[in-house]
Image (cartoon, rainbow, N blue to C red):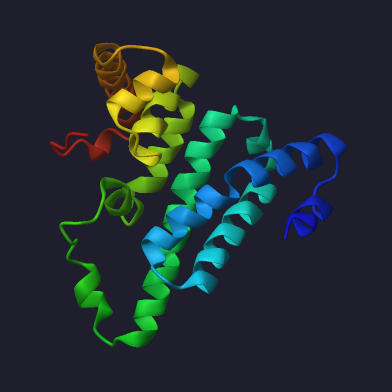
């Protein structure tokens, strides 16, 4: 697959970066896809393939730092796997519309957000944040790292992680409602 992806890129720099990203993150992306899709290896491979194809379509994302790109890839592959799971289930049942409207208690917040109308708005506002705020939110909510792991990764204490997460959520909330003032219906993030 890597040769297919490389053939779609124009410059040697893009090809080199794509090779690094693919080799570094393919297994983790596949693991995330399988965690959603279970034993369906074909669909898991499709989710990973669709994720890397999306990365090629938006090749400016290759310029992101590795930790941010990894968080983004894992979030995207998870959404792609969920979409494939829903398509597969839709073909298997006739009443899935009724089932989909009831979120299961096991669903993570990312799944609920990705199925809502607000997801696109939220991701736009997240990408507009400065790097430190965006990174810590991506590590916490897309990579699903614990505060301890985030602290180890960033070289800061748990208390500093909590403070930075709080400030990042405040900034995201402020940024979101500044752009979408009609969405304030008493929601909290």
Q: Quadrant of the N terminus?
A: bottom right
At horizontal 33% and vertical 21% (from top left) the residue drawn is 168
In the rendering, at what x and y percent does residue 52 appear? 63, 52
In the rendering, at what x and y percent does residue 151 appear? 35, 19
In the rendering, at what x and y percent does residue 185 appear? 16, 39
Q: Is residue 34 above or below residue 86?
A: above
Q: Residue most toward the left?
A: 186
Q: How many marks?
A: 0
Q: Is residue 1 above or below residue 158?
A: below
Given residues 95 and 52, the one toward you in this image is 52
Position of 47 compared to 135: left or right?
right
Q: Quadrant of the C terminus?
A: top left
Q: Quadrant of residue 92?
A: bottom left
Q: Quadrant of residue 172?
A: top left
Position of 53 compared to 154: left or right?
right
Position of 169 compared to 58: left or right?
left
Given residues 89 and 156, the one toward you in this image is 156
In the rendering, at what x and y percent does residue 144 appear? 34, 39
Q: Quadrant of residue 171?
A: top left
Q: Is residue 12 above or below residue 77?
A: above
Residue 58 visible somewhere in the drawing: no
Residue 44 visible somewhere in the drawing: yes
At horizontal 18% and vertical 62% (from top left) the residue drawn is 104
At horizontal 51% and vertical 70% (from top left) the residue drawn is 41
At horizontal 24% and vertical 13% (from top left) the residue drawn is 159
Q: Is residue 55 above or below residue 39?
A: above
């Amino acid at each position: 697959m890597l040769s297919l992806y490389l053939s779609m890129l124009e410059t040697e720099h893009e090809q080199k970066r794509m090779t690094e990203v693919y080799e570094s993150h393919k297994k983790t992306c596949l693991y995330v896809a399988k965690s959603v899709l279970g034993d369906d290896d074909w669909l898991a491979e499709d989710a990973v393939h669709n994720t890397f194809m999306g990365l090629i379509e938006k090749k400016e994302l290759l310029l992101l730092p590795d930790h941010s790109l990894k968080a983004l890839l894992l979030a995207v592959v998870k959404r792609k796997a969920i979409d494939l799971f829903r398509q597969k289930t839709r073909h298997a049942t006739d009443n899935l519309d009724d089932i989909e409207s009831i979120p299961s208690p096991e669903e993570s917040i990312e799944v609920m957000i990705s199925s809502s109308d607000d997801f696109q708005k939220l991701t736009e506002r997240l990408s507009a944040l400065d790097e430190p705020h965006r990174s810590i939110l991506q590590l916490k909510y897309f990579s699903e790292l614990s505060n301890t792991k985030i602290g180890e990764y960033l070289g800061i204490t748990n208390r500093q992680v909590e403070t930075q997460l709080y400030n990042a959520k405040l900034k995201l909330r402020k940024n979101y409602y500044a752009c979408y003032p009609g969405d304030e219906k008493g929601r909290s993030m």
